[in-house]
Each structure stands twice: as C-alpha cells, then as structure tokens.
Amino acid sequence: GSTSEALHRLLQVLFFEAHVTRQRRIEDRQLDEAALSLESPSELAALRKSALATTTFEPYEGVVRLGHYVDVTGGANQGRRGVVKGFGETDTIPTRRKRTCRIKLVDGGLCDVEQQLVRSSGGDETQFLLYAMGVNSDAVREACMRLSHETRLALSEARRRVLRDELPLLSLLQTE
C-alpha cells in the first residue's frame, strides 16, 4: 500500500545519505532527516544551515588542517565559518611573519586569516554537520511532526521494525 511505498522511499533516502556521509551506523535522528529530505527538503536545508552556523564547536586542541571546518575568532571576519583551503604567511613586518589560513566562507567568499584567529572543529564540514545535526535533533524531530500522515506512518513503521529487529533494513528494499 501507500505506507509501504513511503517506507521504501524513506529507506532509499536514508541509505543514500548514509553512503554520502560514510556512516556505517544509522541513528534514529537520521530517519527523521531522511523523512524531511523526502517531503520538505527546503526545511531540512534550513535546519542544516542553522546547525552549521550556530552549533558550538567541541574543544579541539590539534593543528588546523586543510579541509577543516573552522570558526574565525577575531579580526574582520570574526564569527564567520568556512573550510580551510590553503595556508600562507603575512609579511607585514619582515621579522614577524604570521601563518595564515585561506578560508572559503560559508557564503562562498574567500578570506585570509591569521591562524591564531581560527578555531577548528577538528574535522571537515560533513563531519561537523553530522555532529551539529545530532546536537539539534530536537528541532528536526519537531519539524517531522509537520510531515504528512503517510510519511509519519512510514517513519513510525521503520522505527518499529528496527527496534524489534523484525526485518533487516536492506530486506525492506527488496522488490516483492
């Protein structure tokens, strides 16, 4: 019936998202994200954008690396976030060279920032997004309450089957 079709679509999106983010373990909140992706992709995009922009970084004491998702903590770009695309040095005073990070900002712009003014999330943007969406899972769950009855039934059925271990998730995608 229509619930099994909705369940099938939900699981397809779930597995695609898990593949793209290289997740081997699928968490309950990812079912919610898959459901939103199916029925309200613009709302999911807005939730992800907000999570990337506002979620506090966990303490990371390591070296800032190429590809890290970072937060600018000072200077003209303070409070902006982006991805490290390269490194360089400033030469304002010949005896005081400072290492800089070239950052592709979330809004698409590029900036060079002294490395000491950059706080790293410790991973790339996808890794931070996974963390941030986990922190913001209540907002995603709340958004799912506004989904259609059919999609909420499919979501409930997926949770029920996984919880009871009645059927491996992959077998739900087999054609009948």
Image (spheres, rainbow, N blue to C red):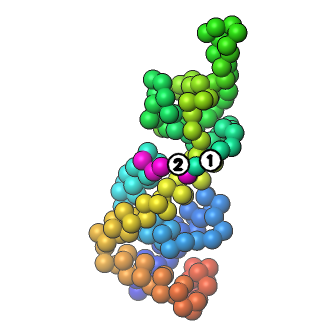
Question: What's the magenta bit mostly, secondary-structure-wise?
Answer: loop
Q: Which residues are magenta?
A: 54-58
Q: Is residue 147 above or below residue 77?
A: below
Looking at numbered disc 1 in the image, what kind of residue is underneath it?
Tyr
- Residue 60's disc number: 1
Residue designated by label 2 = 57
Q: Nearer the viewer, residue 127 or 72?
A: 72
Q: Return the x and y of residue 126 as percentages of the image width and height.
A: 58, 51
Verify whether residue 66 appears in magenta.
Answer: no
What residue is shown at x 43% (from left), y 78% (from top)? 155
Tell me what residue is drawn at x 51 percent, y 33 percent.
Answer: 72
Q: Check disc 2 and give the amino acid type.
A: Phe
Q: Is residue 105 left or right of residue 90?
A: left
**Can you say which quadrant of the picture contains the N terminus?**
bottom left
Give the total number of marks visible in the rendering.
Answer: 2
Q: Which mark, by number, is residue 108?
A: none
SS assignment at label 2: loop
Residue 150 sits above or below residue 133 on the image: below
Pick the front one: 135 or 38: 135
* Residue 39 at least partly seen: no
Q: Is residue 55 magenta?
A: yes
- Disc 1 residue crowd, few under 14, some 14–19, many 20+, Cα 10 Å: few
